Image (spheres, rainbow, N blue to C red):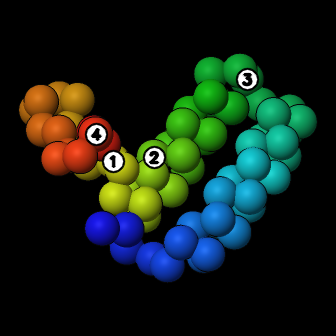
Amino acid sequence: MPKLPTELLTQIGAALERYELEVRAAPLTQTTKDTYVLHAAHFVRWLADDFVPGSQLTGTRRAGGGL
């Protein structure tokens, strides 16, 4: 079950897209940009209950198709 209402998650998703555009335009190395975007996306996925920190390391998966 998501940690926030769907309407709010939609707004956060749109903000994440704007954030990615800003990060991609910033004078940073490509690796740094990728890291910033990936970590922000993981947080948004966590809010949507579609990400478990460390799950790829431990093999933990969400029931119902998420990680």
Which residue lies under the disc numbered 1?
Answer: 51
Q: Residue at x 12, y 30 (%)?
A: 59
Residue type at mark 3 is Thr
Residue type at mark 2 is His
Tell which tag, 3 or 2, sits nearer the viewer: 2
Q: Is 12 placed above or below 38 here?
A: below
Residue 50: percent from left, percent from top: 36, 50
Which residue lies under the disc numbered 4?
Answer: 65
Q: Residue at x 62, y 28 (%)?
A: 34
Classify residue 10 by image quadrant. bottom right
How far apart are the alpha carbons under marks 1 and 2?
7 Å
Examine the rendering and report whether any part of residue 19 can be seen: no
Considering only order in the chain, which callout, 4 or 2, is on the residue closer to the N terminus? Answer: 2
Contact flag, marks 1 and 2 (Cβ < 8 Å)? yes
Q: How crowded is mark 1: few (under 14 residues within 10 Å), some or many (20 or more)?
A: many
Considering only order in the chain, which callout, 3 or 1, is on the residue closer to the N terminus? Answer: 3
Q: Which residue is drawn at 65% across and 57% down?
A: 13
Q: Is 46 placed above or below 57 here?
A: below
Considering only order in the chain, which callout, 2 or 1, is on the residue closer to the N terminus? Answer: 2
SS at mark 3 in the image: loop
SS at mark 4 in the image: loop
Tell which tag, 2 or 4, sits nearer the viewer: 4
Q: Residue at x 33, y 47 (%)?
A: 51
Considering only order in the chain, which callout, 2 or 3, is on the residue closer to the N terminus? Answer: 3
Which residue lies under the disc numbered 2?
Answer: 42
Which residue lies under the disc numbered 3?
Answer: 29
Residue type at mark 4 is Gly
How far apart are the alpha carbons under marks 2 and 4?
16 Å
